[in-house]
Amino acid sequence: MTQAEPLVDIRGLNKYFGHNHVLRDIDFSVARGEVVCVIGPSGSGKSTLLRCVNMLETPQSGTVRVNGRELTDPDCDIDAARRQIGMVFQQFNLFPHHNALDNCTLALTTVLKNKREVAERIARENLERVGLADKLDAYPARLSGGQQQRVAIARALSMDPALMLFDEPTSALDPELVGEVLSVMRRLAAEGMTMIVVTHEIAFAREVADRVVFMDGGGIVEQGPPATLLSAPRAARTRDFLKRVLVPVAD
Amino acid sequence: MTTRQSGEAPRRTSPRIRARRIRAVQYALLVAVVVAAGLSADWAQIGRSFFDPGLIRYTVMHGLWLALWNTLVYTAGGFVLGLVAGTLLAMMRLSDVGPYRWLATVYIEFFRGLPALVVFMAFSLLPLAFPGLAMPLPPYGTVWAALGIVGSAYMAETIRAGIQAVPRGQIEAARSLGMSASQAMWRITLPQAFRIMIPPLTNELIMLIKDSSLVFIVGLSAANFDLTKFGRAAANSNVNITPLVVAGLGYLIITLPLSIIVRRMEAAASRGR
């Protein structure tokens, strides 16, 4: 796995919000085709780390390389780099003034300058892929949370990205809608998509991830295959966190 | 003084009956005022000098529609100019570039604080300051520019508030798809912001319609009279206020359908959401 150049390579990353040191000297890389789940308590910096991968947050120091491009280089064409990185948000962030199909075609026509017919074909394929072939004309407000998040995944996939980022994709969903989104993500992982998933779904991480990263206090505490990290964590902080997450009702 | 148990004691009158009594008193007062005004008014005089049927007919037949059209043209041009300049100013106010922000702030505060009348006077005297300066399409150029300047200062703040009301996640989603900052602004932020801005922008349009009555300062020939100037001229030459009343009703012919259209637009926009 380590001989080829990693798809994502982050070195010495530091991020501050004011005086708050959110990311401390992070080294982190992801191989092509790898599925990495990032877990950790809220405020641990896991979402910020994810948002640094496509430069939605600008780090104060360190380098971020994705697919051979250095995004932290001031001369980097950040818009071009982002086309290869799909992102799915906790709050879906669908465009409310466009229907499901146009949410997917918009970037295809405006950014990639695809013809309308081509864009629609790609969008339709991807909406079918997430099981929403019958919702092409629906506006986001008419869709359930689970359906909205699937449209958001289809929107990101329409750009044919090399990497998909998921920022707590199921945290805003009603419990009964979590399954449909996770099953789309599971299929995506099986198809070989490179994915970084910030999540609280430990069961999903255990089943789908190639590697689980536990973050706390702005740093990576430990990482490893899910079977090892989730069942036999080495660090005390990881054990504490997992105990709290897996047995939430016990006190 | 009531005791602690008073909360459990039955009230003498129920809230419903009390509300009904209060409303009855309000209606009675309203009727009393209307009746008093009706009894004290000199109806014959009102009929003669405000609603002279012959003069109403004369006013409607001779120039009302042209004046109405002129008012519409003045306002429409001013509104379009104001909207474009206002959008630009709003984006300057939200810019990361300091000088843009300061310039926009100074402009907005200056022209929002100035009476429209003063702007019109300054504009009609502009050729004195810049000899040889001629606004295009007289008198429209001057009128549109003056109305546009006044309107843009108000609209800029409305548009800025509208842009800021669009959630940050929308821009993040657009940028993460590879859209540039300006693509995200024009394709994602502004279309949503304008929906939020429909009601306040309608207010500003209606204010502009009324501000267009200041065009008389520019100095117009009769063919270019707006509603107010037309009404005043006719009222003066007939020594009767009826034409001005008719001209005033002309404004309602514009504003009432406008309100209805906007209400429909709002309903349509909220359905799409």
Image (cartoon, coloured by chain):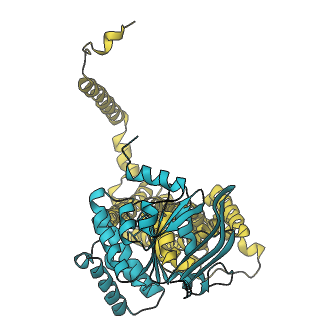
Q: Position of residue B226 (x, y in %)?
A: 49, 68
Residue found 36% across the figure and 35% down from its top: B37
**How many tags in the picture?**
0
On-image quarter of the C terminus of chain A: top left
Residue found 30% across the figure and 84% down from its top: A124
Q: Position of residue A221 (x, y in %)?
A: 57, 61
Q: Nearer the viewer, residue A215 or B243?
A: A215
Above or below, A193 against B14 in this view is below
Above or below, B111 against B3 in this view is below
Above or below, A80 against B71 in this view is below
**Residue A193 location, quadrant:** bottom left
Residue found 26% across the figure and 76% down from its top: A132
Is residue B104 visible in this depiction of the protein? yes
Q: Nearer the viewer, residue A187 or A98?
A: A187
Is residue B75 visible in this depiction of the protein? no
Q: Is residue A153 left or right of residue A81?
A: left
Q: Nearer the viewer, residue B94 or B79?
A: B94
Q: Position of residue A32 (x, y in %)?
A: 48, 84
Q: Is residue A171 left or right of residue A219?
A: left
Q: Nearer the viewer, residue B1 or B108?
A: B1
User: Which lettered chain is shown in cyan?
Assistant: A
Above or below, A244 against A47 in this view is above
User: Which lettered chain is shown in yellow?
Assistant: B
Q: Position of residue B94 (x, y in %)?
A: 62, 66
